[in-house]
Amino acid sequence: MPESRPNEESDENSEYGAYRAYAAPETAVQRRARRAQFLRDLHEARELRDRVQPRRARAARMRQQMRMRTFRW
């Protein structure tokens, strides 16, 4: 008779069991779509931050311009 574990989840519902269910290899198309979505969200977050913190955004632009001016090809 299997030992019952009332305080623990079964293997099917545990984190590891759930992970195994989704561990199918990701296709390149899926990875690129997920990456594109991430980059869109990141760009949107940066734009929002620049709108709500204009002084910091201006200082960051100035630092970037200085880096580009002093960069040697």
Image (spheres, rainbow, N blue to C red):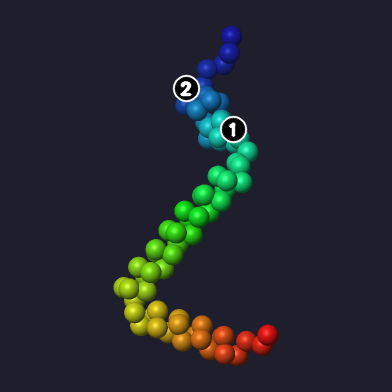
Please name the amino acid that badge 1 sits on.
Arg
Residue at x 57%, y 16% (from the top left corner): 3
Vertical relation: 20 (above or below) 60: above
User: Which of the two residues, 52 or 39, is positioned nearer the viewer here?
Assistant: 39
Q: Secondary structure at mark 1?
A: helix
Mark 2 neighbour density, 10 Å: few (under 14) some (14–19) many (20 or more): few
Kindly give the residue lying farthest to the left in the view shown.
52
Mark 1 neighbour density, 10 Å: few (under 14) some (14–19) many (20 or more): few
Q: Is residue 6 left or right of residue 16?
A: left
Residue at which label 1 appears: 20
Residue at x 45%, y 62% (from the top left corner): 42
Vertical relation: 23 (above or below) 62: above
Q: Disc 2 vs disc 1: which is toward the camera?
A: 1
Q: Quadrant of the C terminus?
A: bottom right
Vertical relation: 20 (above or below) 30: above
Q: CA distance from mark 2 to mark 1?
A: 23 Å
Marks 2 & 1, CB-CB < 8 Å contact: no
Percent x, y for residue 21? 56, 31
Kindly give the residue lying farthest to the top in the view shown.
1
User: Which of the two residues, 66 or 56, is positioned nearer the viewer here?
Assistant: 66
Residue at which label 2 appears: 6
Residue at x 39%, y 63% (from the top left corner): 44
| One can see residue 28 in this view | yes
Please name the amino acid that badge 2 sits on.
Pro
| Disc with the residue nearer the chain's start (2 vs 1) | 2
User: In the figure, residue 24 lies in which quadrant?
Assistant: top right
Vertical relation: 57 (above or below) 44: below
Q: Quadrant of the N terminus?
A: top right
